[in-house]
Image (tube, coloured by chain):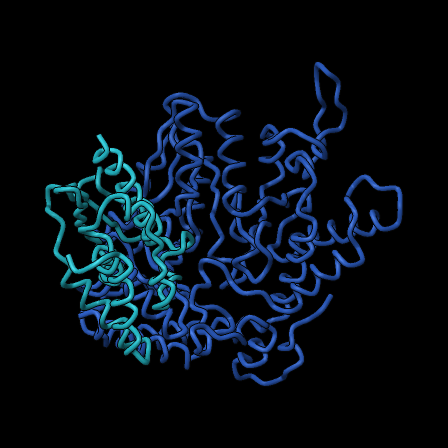
Amino acid sequence: MSTPATSRTSSTAPPVAAIRADFPLLQRTMHGQPLAFLDNAASSQKPRQVIDAISQYYQSEHANVHRGVYEISAAATEAFEATREATRRYIGAASTKEIIFTKGTTESINLVASCFERAILKPGDEVLISMMEHHSNIVPWQIACEQAGAHIRAIPVDSAGELVLDDLDTLLNERTRIVALVHVSNTLGTINPVERIIAAAHARNIPVLLDGAQAMPHMRVDVQALDVDFYAFSAHKMYGPTGVGVLYGKEDWLDRLPPYQGGGEMIREVRIDKTEYNELPFKFEAGTPNIAGVIGLHAAISYLEALPWEVVEQHEAQILGHATELLNQVSGLRIVGTAGQKTSVISFTVDDVHPHDIGTLLDQQGIAVRTGHHCTEPLMRHFGIHGTVRASFGIYNTIEETERLYTAVNKAVNMLR
Amino acid sequence: MSGTIEQIQREIVDEFSFFSNWTDKYEYLIDMGKNLPLIDPAYKTEDHLIKGCQSRVWLHADLDQGRVKFTADSEAVITKGIIALLVRALSGQRPEDIATADLHFIDEIGLKEHLSPTRSNGLAHMVRKMKMYGLAFTANVGK
């Protein structure tokens, strides 16, 4: 498997230049300006290693998996299952039976919610989420609760964008069947104290699902150290391809749950009246999977594994600090989400200026950000706003780009006022 | 009213030809957005809301002596500036002319990207809605 250019450098300085050189798209321009890609929380760009792995697979290794009697199919199966092992190793899972490939975080959460609806949730039961969830960790639970006659409760959020855990002991009660919580907020960047919540839930034998979509690109996650029961994430936010995600689940939980979808792959024996399901993890993988995507995920994991994480985390923290300091100097600008523990995400509003207008004028200046509610409408309501401008950074962003952001926001605000 | 849809489009293209950079162009749009006569608050309702993903846009149309009068508003001022151009080109025109108008000026002044259905600003939907009003009022006038 290919390794990033960074692993070849011995410098202790942030190897950003070497990392940037691995991402072909970053070389392009937008509206005639060098591209500053600050929308990584929506989706990150892909290194050449990932693009090449997918291309190579389609050019010379493609066949369907798990059923072939010929060389290419066996090799494709081997590459596919090698990703499962790489994923297991990367997140510290105990077994490859605990790694389910899905379309993405959304499907991973829907899988658990749907299976809980059919096998666990009863009328009067509760599902505990938080006010800062992405819609994809709200709506699947609403659907499940509606079907089962269960209810959703939400951990509140304070003005800094941190969870308010004062009432955790009453929010977790004998009716709670699962806690489904975002590890890192996509809108605010808040890193939630998940260890504490997992411990409190486990003290009552309540399982915990974490939405790790925004955590995986910024930190190393160890599911066994967290002792989390389910962990959902997407490849495309961690420098891998779109259309592939992972659901980690503790083996005993996955054994207890019924299949999610029916179809090929997930069966052992089918008769017209009755089907015997396949073993883990295949029980949850109906139909031909996104083989190329899974192979691309392997390349992304290999890329991330080879990064000097201490240096990367330090670099992202520096970017966050610098950008926060600069943006706070813009008149009328308010940063939404000022938690003590944050990833490199900055959401902000500016008095009397619509976020969409700022986004439009940043686009003209070559800066890609996201504007809107970021699929967290309950959180927006909590802050009394309709939307924010969100700049979200990744491993390849530079201090210079934070300065360009600052200058461009200033220019936009001056034009709009 | 100051001419046909075609004449107004040519005027707008002329005006925009003076801008040599994006800043001037967007400042002009922002100015127009700020000056756009606001929609009567009575029409700023769910019924008149054009569902864009990010900034809300409202549109109201009246038929007055065979001419369609549009009023509109948006939360985002640049969107409002583009709406002001559309209102300038189409408001006060005959319904059948609105229904069949070819709004080539948008492309010629380099704002086509904002009217793309892939942009979540509701503008593409707004143009469709204005033309639908034209079509609906054409039927009315014919009665």
Determine if residue A314 is in view.
Answer: no
Q: Say whether residue B32 is left or right of residue A139.
A: left
Residue A330: image quadrant is bottom left
Q: Position of residue B76 (x, y in %)?
A: 24, 58
Quadrant location, the N terminus of chain A: bottom right
Determine if residue A254 is in view.
Answer: yes
Chain B's colour is: cyan
Q: How many marks?
A: 0
Quadrant location, the C terminus of chain A: bottom left
Q: Residue at x 74, y 56 (%)?
A: A58
Q: Say whether residue A366 is left or right of residue B19.
A: right
Q: Say whether residue A226 is left or right of residue A378.
A: right
Chain (blue): A
Query: Nearest the camera: B118 or A45?
Result: B118
Name the outermost residue toward the top. Answer: A273
Q: Residue at x 53, y 79 (%)?
A: A16
Q: Position of residue B100 (x, y in %)?
A: 34, 47
Q: Residue at x 19, y 43 (%)?
A: B61
Name the outermost residue toward the right. Answer: A70
Query: Nearest the camera: A101 or B13?
Result: B13
Q: Position of residue A8 (x, y in %)?
A: 67, 80
Relative to B56, say whether A188 is above or below: below
Relative to A160, say whether A10 is above or below: below
Query: Nearest the camera: A31 or A284?
Result: A31
Q: Position of residue A247 (x, y in %)?
A: 57, 45
Relative to B134, say whether A256 is above or below: above
Q: Residue at x 68, y 46 (%)?
A: A95
